[in-house]
Image (spheres, coloured by chain):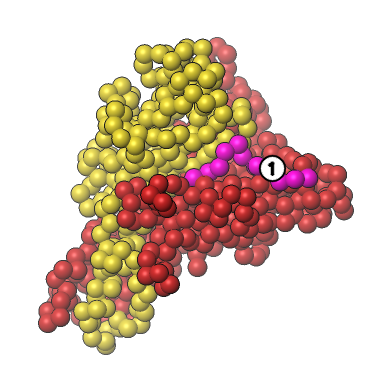
Amino acid sequence: MASSEFTFYLRHDPAQLGGADPVDVGQARYLVNNVNHLADVAGQVWIDYRPHATSHFREPAIASTSEFKYIVTYGPFLARLRPDGSPYPLRCALCGKSQQGDNVTFRLAIGLNREIRDLVESGDASQCLEASTTSMNHGWLGTSVPGGSASTLIELPSSHEYMTEYTAESALAAGDPVSVRVAEVYVGVYGKTANVASKPHLSGLYVAEYVGL
Amino acid sequence: MSGGVPVRRLVAQHDGILIGKAVRSPHLFDVGAQANWLNGRASVLIPLFDPFITVNAGATATMRWRVETRYAAIQLIWLVFARSLDGTGRASAVQLAAPTGTTLTSRVAAAAREATAPLVLVQNLASQNASEVELSLDVKAIDFNCEVYGVACFEMPRLNLAQDANEYGVDLLTLGARQPIYDGAAGQSIDAVAEAVKRAKNIARRNGMLMWAVPEASALTTTSAVLVDLATVDAPALARCLFRDPATGLAELTRTVAWRVRVKIPNDGLTTGEIVVQTTRGGAGVTLATISIPVNSGAGAFHYLPSTAGAPSTFLLDCDDLTQVDGRQAPGGTPRFDFIKFRWRRTAGTGTVECNGVFVFEPAP
């Protein structure tokens, strides 16, 4: 959630906080507010694309009317973590169409790579979003929590299982290798249809970190 | 010492900072640690996108982008999602190189029904740079035709930041209780904290917002004399919200973002073109910015516009609304993204106008 006192960045001159200057309450609170606000708005865009032609889409290899079938999985994305270890919530949107005008449903799941399939199957409301359409034209779709209300936000639970280590350089050239801890998160999209002759066509995705209310 | 970068952000507490009470060391320690987190946890430079391209066996697809890296970036992580299109389900070797023309590194693209993992390439940068640069990537299919269905690039997070006027790392030990207050020493004490927070405003940006690039052979083309859409649908985007609007006292509604395009026209002395940008905020059909393609621009080759030697073109994009559940502004009570629409046309001559890249990013002020 947003954590800064004023919910804005306050213009502030660092020269007022030299070693010889007194630290007054106002300046200190400005500093605290600013660093919190910058962290609140530090979320990054993970995915943003859309089609440039009607032939631009991905579809499941097998269409099903009863279960969601794999379309794409993307990741790992390096999540920004909140103080409790949970990733920043993710604002999502799906772009797609129906092959022949029958109702098609996309289900997007975000989490650990190994749990994406189970999340899709269970429709876990905390880590999945759904969107349906009968349109045969590409378009951004209204999303909702499976079985629930309209939403574009997925809020992942706190879990140490996101964490792994990358070996990185410590400096530009000739630096010693170091281990950097990162939180890896994956995004998967599956689809099903009311008619196997009319596959769900995924043509765009948007996923971005947002600190949440 | 150097500025250690925490894995998680903190929430620095202001409650105890009151008139009559001393500003204590833990307050400043949290601010310094969070400044290091902001400046060291890296950016997404190229948000993942699907180029919808096929690379034929033996061929190399080269893609190019304009981005603004952080100075602290010393390595980039590329994710390339590719799958072999061999009809009998055999995998294909794929070679990657970043930047283009450097040593190719071998990876394996699994067959279509098995390819769910990315091909990862870590690029060591030749220099540190906080200005606009070109990123490029070669994807070479070896055994069979390969479909590329995703490309992304982000900076490797840093473990420590240097205490200097480029990386602005804060030595957290100098913020401890009973430590001397250094004045003017890089990365130490309260003036370093204040400087790091000020710089974080520009460093911890939403660097890559919408990055689309395809190989030159897959460029879009137009000969239309009237504006037509560059993409089939528009792209959602929102900028970060920093300031209060002095006129209203409320959060700023829009933020300036930059864009460049990569285009080509024939070197015929006649053909010209233009690409315009429109947004939901700006109103349907209202052009917010135009990039003109003058006669003989690029001498018949693909090139960036505006020229990389100058300032990028800019337009206003909706900001996050921190009072909304998902940050989308809700004019009239209905939350919505700001959608970006690019349109283009040939403005003179008889040649074909081509485009193989559009790049939207938040520029450094």
A92 and B29: which one is in front? A92
B124 and A150: which one is in front? A150
Q: Is residue A61 left or right of residue A181?
A: right
Q: Is residue A133 left or right of residue A33?
A: right
Q: Which residue extends farthest left?
A: B20
Q: Residue at x 41, y 73 (%)?
A: B246
* Magenta residues (range): B225-237
Residue at image mark 1: B228
A156 and A164: which one is in front? A156
- Residue A93 at x, y = what percent? 43, 38
Drawn colour of chain A? yellow
Does the magenta-highlighted stretch encompass residue B231? yes
Above-or-below relation of A140 to B23: above
Drawn colour of chain B? red
- Residue A161 at x, y = what percent? 24, 37
What is the crowding at mark 1: few (fewer than 14 residues within 10 Å), some, or many (at least 20)? Answer: some
Q: Residue at x 49, y 36 (%)?
A: A140
